[in-house]
Amino acid sequence: MIVQNIDRVEGITPADFKKHYYTPRKPVIIAGTGLSQNWPAYSKWTWDYFKSIVGDKTVGVYNNERANENTLVNGADDYITFGEYLSMVEKGPVALRIFLFNIFQHAPQLVEDFTWPDELASGFLKKYPMLFVGGAGSIAHMHYDIDLSHIFHTQFIGRKRVLLLENNQSPFIYRMPFTVESAASFVNWNEHLDTEQFPALKHARGYTSILNHGDTMFMPAGYWHHMEYLDGGFAMSLRALDPSLLGKLNGLYHIVGLRGMNNLMIKMAPKWWYHKKREMARQRAEKALQELH
């Protein structure tokens, strides 16, 4: 792959953010001193604090195994209490993660611990801030968010390596039809990629960085992302709808039409559909390579 570092700023004015990142849809990391260090959450949110307020809630956990032909979108691998899970992460390493956990439904007082960055973007879904937790060694495999929202992703505790690619790189990373997933594996991508089996990966253009405590990453709508937890940690995502009508309609199509069709095909012909998606991904990658020459 052709990879460059994600821009990193200590602070940024709303005008500069919109000019250089939001409008051109380019990722950027706003370091803790520029945003989250002013939040009570920066120091208040700890493993023990979360255990004390929502430790008894049941959550779905996900392992590092990639989906097979019988796996529906967003199906959890197991269910345990949040407190049990956090204890496992603290002891670590444990290759289990939680995503899209709306902890704020169970502990609404948490919304007082941070400030929505309304000066940077509009259309925030203020009922749906989401928590993402992972043990050291856990992986969020390459995908893009199905609702096509802009994401402000703030890391708390631990470090996480991220790889981002603009959505127009989809053919080069073997996007499977009717999914937001890649047929290729990006596990330990910084050390090795299987470019023999997936030759188009050589031409994919991406961005990378390591997120530390307090870093807020702006990830524009539709960006592919692969995340590897270097330490046990957690992050919060604040989602903002695409301001354009076309963007909103595309997000609705993804949630209702695209996901619905993929799940229907998994139920009807799982093995055939599993291989068909990968075959079509290869065909699209080969076509993209031909167009380069």
Image (tube, rainbow, N blue to C red):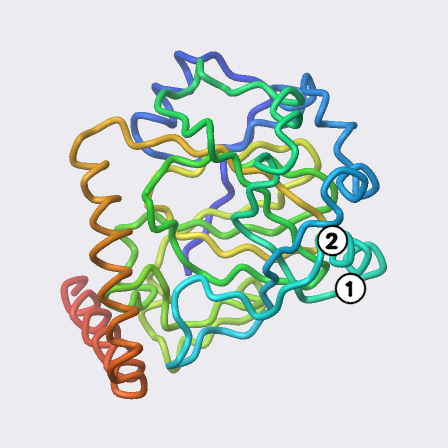
The residue sitting at 52% across, 34% down in the picture is 129
Q: 249 or 212, which is in the foreground?
A: 249
Q: Nearer the viewer, residue 264 or 251?
A: 264
Disc 2 on helix, strand or loop? loop
Q: Does 85 appear above or below 67?
A: above
Q: What mark, if any, has residue 93 been given in the picture?
A: 1
Q: Residue at x 60, y 51 (%)?
A: 161
Of the numbered discs 2 and 1, the one sitting upstream in the chain is 1
Label 1: which secondary element: loop
Q: CA distance from mark 2 to mark 1?
A: 7 Å
- Which numbered dot is residue 126? none
Residue 160 in the image: x percent, y percent?
Answer: 64, 49
Q: Are marks 2 and 1 in contact (CB under 8 Å)?
A: yes
Where is the N terminus found, in terms of image quarters? bottom left
Q: Is residue 11 left or right of residue 259?
A: right
Q: Position of residue 66 (x, y in %)?
A: 49, 73
Q: Residue at x 31, y 83 (%)?
A: 270
Q: Place residue 230 in its image quadrant.
A: bottom right
The quarter in which the C terminus is drawn is bottom left
Out of 71 and 93, give the one closest to the viewer.
71
Percent position (x, y) of residue 236? 58, 38
Which sits in the foreground, 134 or 125? 125
Q: Dot 2 surroundings within 10 Å: few (below 14), some, or many (20 or more)? A: many
Q: Which residue is mark 2?
A: 232
Check disc 2 and give the amino acid type. Gly
Q: Quadrant of residue 38?
A: top right
Pointer 1 local density, CA inside 10 Å: few below 14, some 14–19, many at least 20:
some
What residue sits 33% from the left and 33% below the top? 25
Name which residue type carries label 1. Pro
How far across and how far down the image is residue 290, in percent?
A: 16, 69
Report which quarter residue 282 is drawn in: bottom left
